[in-house]
Amino acid sequence: MLKRIFVSLLAALWLGVAAAADGQKADEQPKVDPKIVQDIFNCMAAGLPKDWKRTWVVVTELGVEGGTRRFEADFFYAGRADDLVGKPLQPCSKEDVAKNVYSLNQFLPAGEKRLWKQATLVFNSDGSFNLKYDYDK
C-alpha cells in the first residue's frame, strides 16, 4: 500500500497537482521540490500504521537566536479523513523533517512570504498533499 501511495504522491508532485483541504486551488499551492516532499513523507511513513488516512506535520517558529530562526515540529496521523485532531506520530527524525519543511522556503517569493510562523504539510493516503503557511501565530 505504501508503494502505491509513493507512486501517487510522486505523480501528483510531478504533475503539479495538490489537493487543498481549505478551498485553496491546486494552482495556488506553493511550489515545492518533489524530492524534498518525498523525503518528508518517507520519514513520516516510517511511523504510520497500516490503516492511516491522513498524516501531517506542523512546524512552528519558536523565535530567532543569533539571527537564526528556530523551529519545532509536531507530527500526527488519523485513521479517518475527517479527523482533524489525530494521534501523535513518531517520524524517523523530527529535526530532518523540520529542516526539510523550512527548506521549501526557497520556492516562496523572496520577502515577507518566507517569514511564516507556522507551516502545516498534510499527506493523504490517496497520495495528495496540502502545504499551508500561517503568518499570525
Image (tube, helix red, strand yellow):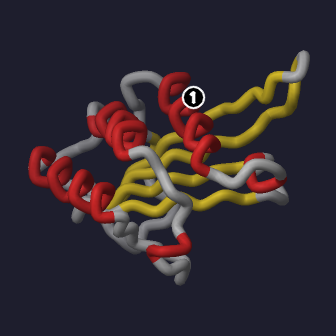
- Label 1 SS: helix
Given residues 47 and 17, the one toward you in this image is: 17
Q: Is residue 136 above or below residue 17?
A: above
Percent from the top left, x then y, of residue 101?
55, 39
Residue 44 seen in this snapshot: no
Q: Residue at x 52, y 67 (%)?
A: 29
Q: Quadrant of residue 105?
A: top right
Q: Is residue 58 above or below residue 83?
A: above
Q: How many numbered markers are drawn?
A: 1
Instruction: Name the residue that disc number 1 marks.
Output: 99
| Left-right relation of 136 to 94 | right
- The three-letter code of the residue at mark 1 reads Lys
Percent from the top left, x then y, of residue 99?
57, 28
Percent from the top left, x then y, of residue 7?
15, 52
Q: Is residue 31 above or below residue 82?
A: above
Percent from the top left, x then y, of residue 77?
39, 51
Residue 33 seen in this snapshot: yes
Q: Residue at x 59, y 61 (%)?
A: 132
Looking at the rendered image, the quarter that the C terminus falls into is bottom right
Q: Residue at x 41, y 31 (%)?
A: 90
Residue most toward the top? Answer: 66
Q: Is residue 127 above or below residue 62?
A: below
Q: How would you rate the neighbour count of disc 1 (Cα within 10 Å): few for under 14, some for 14-19, many for 20 or more?
A: some
